[in-house]
Image (cartoon, coloured by chain):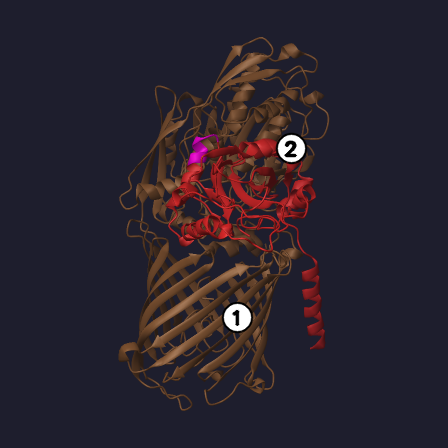
Amino acid sequence: MRRGVHAIVALFACATISCGRPAGESFSARADYIDGAADRHTLALRFAPILSMHSSEPYHVVAVIGVFHPLKPLIAYHIFFEDDAFLAGRGKAFDHELVWAEYDPVTLKITDALTLWHRTVLRTESCLMDAKASGQRPNIDIQWGQHGPLPSGWRSLLTARPRLELAMHYRVARYINRLPRASAKKPAVSFSGSYDDYLTFTEKVDAADYIHAEDVVTAEHSLEFLRSRLGMTFLPKKEWPDW
Amino acid sequence: MSIKISTILPTFLAFLCAGEFAIPAAAHAMSADGAPAARDLVLQTADGIAIDARLYDANNDDVIVYCHRLLSGTEGGEVDFLARTLTDRYDILTFNFRGHKSSFGTTTVGGDEILDLRAVLSFAGLRGYRRIIVLGAGMGGTVGWRTAEIFGNMDALIVISPSGFSPETAPFIIGLASNKMLTTPLGRVPLRIITKTRLGLMSSAGFPLDLAGLPERIPTLVIQSEKDRFVDIRRIRIIFEGLGESGTLAIVPGRKHAEDLIDRDTLARIRAFLDGLPPREEGMRVSRRGDAAGPIGSPRYMSDTLRVALAGDSPLPESVILDELGKRMSVRILAGDSAAYSPQAVVLELRDIFSIHGYTRTSLAVVDSLPPFTVKTSTPRIRTVSITGNRRLPDEYIRSVVLIGGDYYNAYELDRAIRRLSSQPAIQSVKSHVTARDDGDMDILLTVTERRPYGFLLSTKFTDIDDFAGIGFTWNEVNPTALRYEGRALIGVSEHDFLTFHTLAKDLFQNTLCLSATLFDNISSRDDLDYIFSRQEVHEIGGELAARYRLFSRTSVTLGAFGKKSESSEVSLDMPVTEGSSGGVRCMIDLSGSLPRRFPRFAWRHTFYYEKSGPFKFGDFFFDTYQLNLSGELKLSRNHTSLTTIHGGRQSSSAPPQYEFSLGGMTTLPGYPDDSFIGNRFALASQALCLSARSVASETSVWSPLRLILYGHAGTAWEAAQSFSLDNLRMDAGFEFEYMEILRAGCVWPVGNLREGSPRVYIGWGVHVL
């Protein structure tokens, strides 16, 4: 009986310690030929989103970093803004947003576009079809001040999010942000227009303008790379839509 | 004479599976003497799958790429035969399709396998071969045929017994058996163990039901036996009529199939066909492979000798095109002889580059024939996508699946869209028709044939005290009504008891309305009940109507009503049951999520359940039920996980006496007797460690899907007048071996002070019962 227990413990220990590597990683290293290995920077530029921002957006884009998934044809665009209207002056220098573009490595066409909107992954069919018809680049609406990325056609989404929260965010941006905050070093910016105005995105910003060759990396976990580029002044977020 | 079972079983299975299997002819089982040395390679496909290839390099200018049949591989006897007999003039390059033998990934039965052949063709192109000929048998022939139409990049195609896989394209029984074995989980385990072929979970997600369009531009030879037992010869003749002058059909006597047909007579036909190919025209590429140096697949780049400018509308980035052109031309052009390539040669290479990306209809024209050549490209766009033949499925649904239109026409994209649509439960088959407009753009017509989307599953389970046979039936109606029905039944083989679950659901505004019912009779063993809300050893009939609404991303609220009727057919001495009925309302709040920052590998789910019976004095029982379920999954590593569940509950007022009433049942067999938990309060915890053999075995190994689950339960139940006591805990410990989530076998012991009974052993097969 004791021998059996020892055998089970040994099996468990061996199995736990020996963490297998995913197939793609081990094979890529020793593949004699890799089919369809296009230049990563070229691909990152090809599928870079077009950002539609509010005309009175107070913060600018400071960096866009493209991260390729090591095993899937999937690009994460980490978009950094100067600051967040709700968190201004709290010590976080950058506001971090995420847009994903999935592509077909054979046709080099976009096959899906997703955004991380306040911890929720959003996708719309119309955003994808618009991207296919306009040079394979998704059009993403950027929420005023908070920069939550909304895929074009998000108004057709019938779930409670984002509609309820957008209305709430508007009221915070419109009214609450005007209140003085003792903990903040700088006064918060506030929105002054109507709710319809809040949902009007007219300023186009091309994310490709910010993607340089050294800003493209292949990694499943990119936090270290992002921090090496931008410092420790932003909060980590989920890196891939299925996490 | 001894017959090995390892020989018999694959034959039988393959016969059932695809109409593809054939024992290599005796003449093939020769030694490899006379064949050039083989070189094993690893190629990575465009979608990241690593496949094993083997090159018989005799330093020839031409190469024959051999594609094996389903369930076979590079070790087949016909490969040796080809290597011995054809390498006087041709190198032989063969490979294992994805999911076969040592190649990674899972097979899609001829669907995504075109990417495997694409990778091999690209590799052969970069080796600088003058001519690339594809030879395929069975599924390999089908893949070669489809690749010729979708990606081109081959100079000739030889197909032996091209197979279809639907009941329409093969004799009925074989087609039906093939379809069921390949598209349901039933076939996955035996195929994996016996033939080392890994069927994907969604193997039906896009395998081709029929051959694609005809490879009109590529000289094609089709060899087919007259009485092939797997392929309808009449269908081949009909298809072949469309090939015109570019195709040759050779009907040979006999009943042989696939590589069975590869013998000396076939070889003579192949040689005659290759000798009869039209001579190379001016501007065809000129091999310089003999001069090439460096490792395979790492050609030297052209420098200033190749200067090409692109004009016009291109579906691909210019840098991608020029990069590939540089690689290709670097192995084609004679060293230092810039005059060896002409604008026509560049156009041919560019056409192949566009074709290998699926842009087969891109037209190219040389605008300026002096270096740097200026080549104008023009690719048609998709103007309209029309759908016909659908009566129940709305156009919007079909469009949301195919997702094409608005940009450049691409043969591979259309093929994938058709396969994606074909894999939908309500689709029988899809055919496409592409029409060119006067301005060059394309109109696509999709002709859809619908079917009733039902599924059927069988499961069995044997334990030490009872045997069950399980039957599952699903029906997903995809039409404007969008009704779904799912039924499951457990039928006791020895006790003649039964338990059935029925759910009728409909999605409405991204929420689900469902009507569910649980019907059972005298279930004497309830080991594997999951997600039911009460258990009684009496008749019960009931139903509920629930609406599920997703408030936030991982939060849902379920509101519902229920009604039950209990009849006391058997009253045991220790548990009297009162007859009567009850009805009421229920509410369930479900929260789930993960900890992304400090503990990214931990996912949790919390469920709160409340049931109120007897509002408005309806029914005979009046009680409130509260349950709370907390569960978490911690990934210990890439392959191993730890599952923890804690749940408890209580009932108040005049509830009928019940055995344990659990919101989320256990997925493993408990080691204590069924009547251990009696009371209207209970607490239960379980812990399981799931250890995967993948950490020590390769993904391609037969053993890699095996998991060892070590688990234990601890729980107790008590009456309202009593109090919770650790001394009353009943505990068990057990282990289970699970293979591909279908085959399960385990043993569990009762442990602790209150242990009763003896160890229990169980074995199960199926997916929906366990």
Q: Label 1: state its secondary structure.
A: loop
Residue sticking out furthest to the bottom: B573
Residue extent of the magenta highlight? A130-135
Which chain wears red? A
Q: Tell me, what hue is chain B?
A: brown
* Number of marks in picture: 2
At x 38% / y 59%, what residue is drawn? B549
Q: Which numbered circle lies on residue A213? A: 2
Q: Label 2: state its secondary structure.
A: helix
Disc 2 is attached to a residue of which chain?
A
List the residue tagged with mark 1: B668
Q: Name the magenta segment's main secondary structure.
A: helix
Q: Is residue B619 left or right of residue A176?
A: left
B592 up-or-down from B387: above or below = below
Residue A39 in view of the camera: no
Q: Nearer the viewer, residue B549 or B423?
A: B549
Q: Nearer the viewer, mark 1 or mark 2?
A: 2
Quadrant of residue A4 in the image?
bottom right
